[in-house]
Amino acid sequence: MEKLGIIGGLGPMATAFFLEKIVGMTEAARDQEHVNAVVYHAPAVPDRTSFILNPQAADPLPALVEAAKCLEQAGVSAIAIPCVTAHYFRESIGEAVSIPVMNAVAFSTEVLKARQICRVGIMATDGTLASGLFQKELESHGMTAVFPDAAMQKNVMSLIYDYVKAGKEPELRLYEEVSDALQAEGAEAVLLACTELSVIAARNTLPGRWLDVLDVLAMHCVERFARLKEGIADSLLHG
Amino acid sequence: MEKLGIIGGLGPMATAFFLEKIVGMTEAARDQEHVNAVVYHAPAVPDRTSFILNPQAADPLPALVEAAKCLEQAGVSAIAIPCVTAHYFRESIGEAVSIPVMNAVAFSTEVLKARQICRVGIMATDGTLASGLFQKELESHGMTAVFPDAAMQKNVMSLIYDYVKAGKEPELRLYEEVSDALQAEGAEAVLLACTELSVIAARNTLPGRWLDVLDVLAMHCVERFARLKEGIADSLLHG
């Protein structure tokens, strides 16, 4: 029985929603038709952004590799990480195991490209922005990443850390301001490029046009490990 | 780092909600304060009720034991199973590993007893009813289990198999009829003793007075592996 491996807990609520998305996107009339998976839910992994911005901070890589090895041991045949910032470590994790580690950054870029979106507003952690992950991927496809300015980026980080990770209901005004600013800079759609923002999207109605990286990753997992419901691919881009 | 083990996928959506409940019940200001866990999400496990009612059917025990052993190998220190029917196999699973397998049946009984509820309406699968799990546990505490009659039990099984496991929105009328009938039989509260019913409870407003086994199990997991939010214990009994 082929099994999906998930390195979760980064953050914890995003992982619960990721599993919910996978189940919800699966065409199944009974339990036995669903994706089999092992979730290594490890919120104890040191903060990714802290390390990317300051290499003196605790390094999350050893814990991520430990998670990947445990999943490999459990017999999974591919690993998904429902945390965009952790994609900074994706290649290093992949070198430690002999199974593929899915690339949510590439998957999201493909979806946007297929919808002929050229300028993409990126809402992500400071760590993801500093890593240049999306910038490189989008540029390699002739697309442009549009980032929030410093003040707006503070809104994004506040939504992620002060609200979702702290277990508080987010102030949607903070999101709207960033979304409006990115659109004003010519972004044709906003990419929710942090799975904590996916938690906000799952619980609220967001303005503007947006794509959620967590949806894209979940879709790929279902396509590979079960049967995808009809219409999912067409419903990914909102607004 | 102490880790919780979860045998999940029975059913799949209940497991996603179970993880969501654990995260939501945890008092935490950042990722690192959350429960660490490994979820062995195995919807492929043969149907529990089918086997309990007909021992010629595929036996789920080997797959459940395999899951438990994999979790033990991954270093978890206790196992929770967010599937009530699977509690029929709880002792056998426990014999195959050297870590405790939590007892959601006993936990739920304790909660009801503390609230001085004597007559408990049970909504569960045919398998759970046939196993006598709740009947024995409640009676050993001087309480009484009240079961739906045959027609009402068909409603319960339909909600579980034709709606939740089949990925369909449930007809709440089916639930209301059972809830009313159990109350008419003197039930002071209804126990949602199948985690598929917890999925309905998470998405709808249910009538009557009820307790969800999944909530109780999640609370115990948080108490043991992290810090429980204030007020959770007092909010378990609804209506």
Image: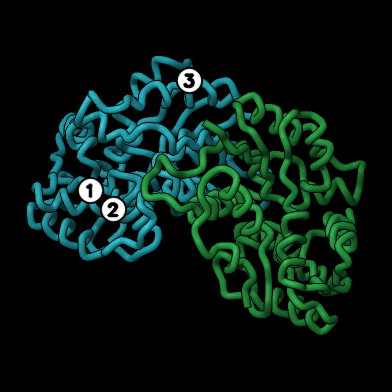
Chain colours: A cyan, B green
| Residue A127 vertical position relative to residue A117 in the rendered view, above or below | above
- Which residue lies at the image location 11% right of the left edge and 57% below the top edge? A181
Determine crowd level at label 3: few under 14, some 14-19, many 20+ residues with C-alpha closer than 10 A: some
Q: Amino acid at mark 1?
A: Met
Q: Is residue A137 left or right of residue B96?
A: left
Asked if both marks, 3 and 1, belong to the same chain, the answer given is yes
| Callout in the foreground (2, 1) | 2
Q: Which residue is mark 2?
A: A162
| Callout in the foreground (3, 1) | 1
Q: Chain of mark 2?
A: A
Determine crowd level at label 1: few under 14, some 14-19, many 20+ residues with C-alpha closer than 10 A: some
- Which residue lies at the image location 76% right of the left edge and 73% below the top edge? B116
Label 2 or label 1, whichever comes before in sequence order = 1
Q: Amino acid at mark 2?
A: Asp
| Callout in the foreground (3, 2) | 2
Asked if both marks, 2 and 1, belong to the same chain, the answer given is yes
- Residue B139 found in image quarter: bottom right
Estimate the spatial distance between the alpha carbons at disc 3 and disc 1, rounded to whole Å: 32 Å
Q: Tell me, for residue A234, which label it has, or none.
A: none
| Residue B178 vertical position relative to residue B225 in the rendered view, above or below | below
Q: Which residue is mark 1?
A: A157
- Which residue lies at the image location 69% right of the left edge and 32% below the top edge? B67
Q: Which residue is mark 3?
A: A99
Locate residue A160, reporting x and y percent.
29, 50
Seen from the viewer's position, the closer of residues A189 and B71 is B71
Look at the numbered discs 2 and 1 and tell me whether their residues touch, using CB distance below 8 Å.
yes
Look at the numbered discs 3 and 2 and tell me whether their residues touch, using CB distance below 8 Å.
no
Estimate the spatial distance between the alpha carbons at disc 2 and disc 1, rounded to whole Å: 8 Å
